[in-house]
Amino acid sequence: MKEKYAKYYKEGKTTEEAIKRLEDIISVLRSDEGCPWDKAQTHKSIRSCLLEEAYEAADAIDKEDFDNLEEELGDVLLQVIFHADLANDEQRFDLRSIANRESDKMLRRHPHVFLNKNTESVDKAIEKWENVKRNEKVTSTHTETLKNVPDALPALIRSYKIQKKASEVGFDWEDVSYAFSKVKEETSELLEVYQSGVATNIKEEVGDLLFAVVNVARFLGVNPEEALNQTSSKFIDRFSFIEESAVVQGKRLEDMSLEEMDKLWEQSKLRKQNL
């Protein structure tokens, strides 16, 4: 161990010391005598890392794995500090300015707390938050508001938010029946394009169908991202039953017919219903 780095092996006794320790470690890693990989990174090169770490933290929350959540939140914090260090080198901003800017935002968006403007319910608190947020992000057109929904969001969440913002200015169906009709319409159009043998517009038609399904979810008060994730997990569970059943029968999935696997699939559905 290099003597000058010995201090980094001591845990911070306070929150400030712990964060400063991580800041200093990243600074060393990105210094001339640091790690070649860390020195080569840019905001764009580690963009995917930020997304990945955020999803892993969210996964730990979903699984209520709090030991892992502590670790994953540390990874998220690492990404924030890494970006702050990059920006500081570019003389754009640093961790201090990030924290101060966020603190200022929280004060502005919670006047019902910090300015004694009482709020009676959660709904009212959300309404105040949205009003302040809307005033902060002044846009000249409603289209600009839609464009401000980040492209980097998962596609289902992005489409949900875009539809919700369009709805706020009255561009929406009267009820969910119209949304269901749109799903049927888009399904027919996709089938027509597929049967035509011209695959040029298939991607567009698939997108239209997914967008229509998200609209139905929005009307029904269902988060489409959560719904699809739940179904994906359910698929894995049922597929696991098929594979385990095949092993009991002394078979490999690769050697089974689709009919055999489909029969086990139906059994897996009944198994869940009987629990």
Image (spheres, grey):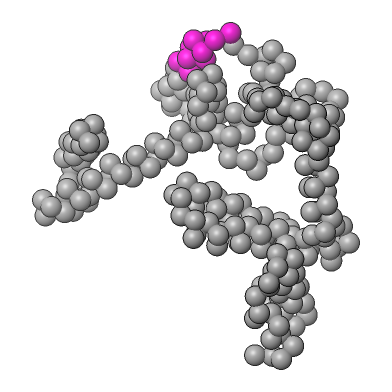
Q: Is residue 40 above or below residue 173?
A: below
User: Quadrant of the rendered structure where residue 38 is?
Assistant: bottom right
Residue 49, percent from left and from top: 62, 58
Q: For the C terminus, give its image quadrant.
A: top left
Res. 234 in view: yes
Q: Which residue is drawn at 69% across and 12% down?
A: 170
Q: Is residue 243 left or right of residue 204?
A: left
Q: Does the magenta stretch include residue 234?
A: no
The residue at the far top in this view is 174
Q: Is residue 240 above or below residue 151?
A: below
User: Quadrant of the rendered structure where residue 135 is?
Assistant: top right
Q: Which residue is drawn at 84% across and 55% down?
A: 97
Q: Main secondary structure of the magenta part?
A: helix
Residue 96, percent from left and from top: 82, 59
Q: For the N terminus, give its image quadrant.
A: bottom right
Residue 92, percent from left and from top: 87, 57
Q: Which residue is drawn at 72% across and 79% down?
A: 34
Q: Is residue 205 left or right of residue 151?
A: left
Q: In this view, does 178 lie to the left or right of 274?
A: right
Q: Which residue is drawn at 34% across and 40% down?
A: 235
Stretch of the chain drawn in magenta:
174-186
